[in-house]
Structures are given as structure tokens and as C-alpha cells.
Image (tube, rainbow, N blue to C red):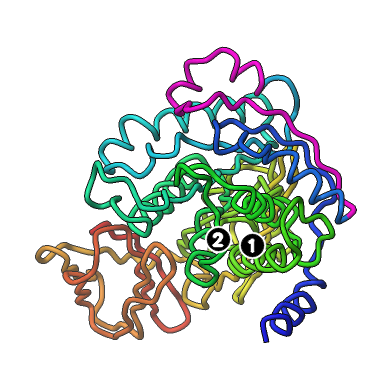
Amino acid sequence: MKKNYLSVLSMALIGFSYAQDSANVLFIGNSYTYVNDLPNLIRDLAASQGDFFESLSQTPGGTTFNNHASNPATYTAINTDDWDYVVLQAQSQEPSFSDSQVNSETLPYAIQLADSVYANNECTDVLMFMTWGRENGDPQWGPISTFDGMNGRLRLAYMRMADSVEASVSPVGSAWKYVRDNNPAIGLYAGDGSHPSIYGSYLAACVFYASIYRKTPVGAPFISTISQADADVLQAAAAITVLDSLDQWDLHGVTEHTQADFTYVVNGPDVTFTNESVRASSYSWDFEDGQNSTDENPTITYSGNGTYMVTLISESACDSDTIQFDITITEASIAENQDLGLSYAKVSPGVFEVIGTSNIDLITVLDASGRLVSQSTSTMIDLSKEPSGMYLINIQLEDKIQRIRVLK
């Protein structure tokens, strides 16, 4: 039954899209990386799949992020090449401690290291090496005194650090738990119950292969010194952990450094755009009505009613990204503005009265984003239950419209 399951998994993943076939990687870590020579295991695994992998390691034993951040050799390694990936791996225990301790003793140095990586090459991907809990946990603190407790805290810490430094995650610790839960006979630990055995390092290599290339390690000919049956299990565990959850580990975004995004505010026929793109240096806007812009934060005026697809292409030296939003300009917002001699008076907090005539055909109230708030023929406008901000009052008399802006 197990062989059939692995065969089906292999067939299901064999068509997974190939992201790239070469990688140049710097490992910043410690003995969890250099024991069993993890980088070379990844290299041999990649080569057996027809992919190219080269690496450099800065991995003194027991080194913390703080140690690395104060070590000139670490920065020399970072500046040695325009890396595709820089892997950051903390000392085995430090991310599992209390949030306050991690916030003061680990996270700031992870940020410092990542900033140095981006300063060397803005197109490099930072990849957090999520490590694993010790075989029987760490007895010095209750929440990490079991494997599950320690492994869970490590997972949360690496995910949080990745979010803080705009990094992706290689979820070795999650694959480790999967194997422990489903195939406990495979010994992932060395004799100290902390460092990896060759099985643990091979599992880590499979997870890194899937994370970097976004391709399945299932069926890879290279199995190091372990049995084919055990290699099948570890390859499948890595594929399931990584490739079934690319969004969770933010691996869809790897090599997509630039991310296009924007918000907008509709004010009558005028639309103001706020660019919220990440790592972009130039912008190209298409407003679908014949207007275009290369401004970072443009404001445009639509001359007709309708729904318009706004396209933003954000570019950097690394790549580009495109995003599109539909914006609706309503008849009330686009109608020609005329001076009908009308004004307004504030009656009470949030309540206004239109002054100048009682013969109103229709009053339409829109908020700053263009959302319809109310429509009526009453000259009294009640915004008391609406949030503070600017509102557009469209007052229609026969075929004429006057627009008045009201600040609540």
C-alpha cells in the first residue's frame, strides 16, 4: 500500500511547474547546517535531478544571529557574490524561547542580516531555515520541554521572522514532525538527540530542494547512504510539506521580488491612486479610457460613466509584477457640476441641511471611496452614524446637478 501511495504521489507531482534549474546559495548558520554537509547533499540531490547547485557556507558551531551580526566574516561572505538565495539559520534553541526574548535577542539580528543581504543585491531571496525541536524537547522551559512544544515554537518564530524580513521559509521542522508522526522508525537524530542523523540531513536536503526549485524530490536518484525505502518516505514527506503549501511558506513569491499593489479613492469623476507596491522603482498605469501615467501616485479624471479596469505594472531591476482592479464611476459622480446657488448648514454633529431651495429632485451622498451612502429627496442629510471623513453631496434639480463636498 505504501508503494502505491508513493507512486501516485510521484505521478501527481511530476508535472509540477519547473521554476528554475540553477541556484547559487549562501548558508549562514551553524552545526545544524554543516553536520553531514547539508549543502553538498542538496547539490548531489539537485544534480541527480538535472539541476545545478553551488553554495558557500558561513556556519561556525553554535552561532546565534547576534554572533553572525557582529562577525565581519559573515558580511564578507554576504558580499562575496550576487546570491540567488541566502539561507538564515539561528542557533537551535534561540527562536524557541519566549516571544519577548526572541524580540530582543534574535529578531533584531535577523533583520540586520537580511538588510545586509538586500543591500548587497536587492534581487537576492532570503530563505529562513526552519529547524526542528530536540528529540525530547528542552527541559529548561515548560513550553519547549517536549518535541511538539519546541517544534511548534520554532515554527512560529521562523514564520514571524520571515514576515519581518520579507523572506520565504524552508520548512524543515514541519517535515521533521511529519516524519516523526507518520514514520517514527526512521531515526532523524544523531546520538545527542539534537543534531541530525544522515536521515535527518537527507530530509532537510529534500525540503531545501523543493523550496528552492519548487520541484518534487520524489524519484530523485540520489539517496546518499540510506535505503531506497527510507529515501522514498523522506522525499515524499518533503514534497507534501513544501509543495502542498507554497503560499504558507511564501514560496510562490520566491524570485518575484517586486509586488504591485495600490489603493484608490473616488471623489466624483476624480480618482486618486496610492501606490503600495513593494520593491519597485518604476510604474506604468493604464486607466482603460485612453489615459496612462508613469507617476508613482497619479490622480486622473474620468469623462464618462462605467467600470474601468485599472492596470498597474510595477518594475524593479529584478523583475516586474502586474495588478488590476475594476473601478466604477457612477452617473451621479460623473454628472456635470453646476453652480445652482445652493449651500449647506451644519444642524448638529453629522447632520447637514441643504440651503437654497426645497424643490429637490434627488440628493445622492457618496463617501470618499465612491460608496453610495444614501439617496433621498430630503434636504436633511444625516451622516451621524457614518465614519468621519469627506463626503460628496450630489444635488439634482431637474437636469442639473451641483456637487458639494462636506467634511464630517
Q: Residue furthest front?
A: 191
Label 2 sits on a secondary structure element that is helix
Task: Report which quarter residue 290 is drawn in.
Answer: bottom right
Q: Residue at x 56, y 23 (%)?
A: 60
Mark 1, Cα crowd under 10 Å, few <14 / some 14-19 / many 20+, is: many
Q: Tag count in the figure?
A: 2
Q: Please provide percent x and percent y for residue 372.
A: 38, 77
Instruction: Report the residue marked by disc 2.
Output: 175
Helix, strand or loop at mark 1: helix
Seen in the picture, residue 14 relative to 125 is either above or below; the reply is: below
Q: CA distance from mark 2 to mark 1?
A: 6 Å
Discs 2, 1 touching: Cβ within 8 Å: yes
Residue toward you, 358 or 33: 33
Count residues near mark 2 (Cα–Cα under 10 Å), then give few for <14, some for 14-19, many for 20+.
many
Question: Residue 336 at what x, y percent from top left?
Answer: 52, 69
Q: Which residues are magenta?
A: 50-78
Disc on res. 238: 1
Residue at the far top: name it.
Answer: 72
Q: Nearer the viewer, residue 268 or 89?
A: 89
Locate residue 319, reporting x and y percent: 75, 45
Viewport quadrant of the N terminus: bottom right
Q: Is residue 240 above or below residue 317?
A: below
Q: Give the amino acid type for the residue marked by disc 1 in the picture.
A: Ala
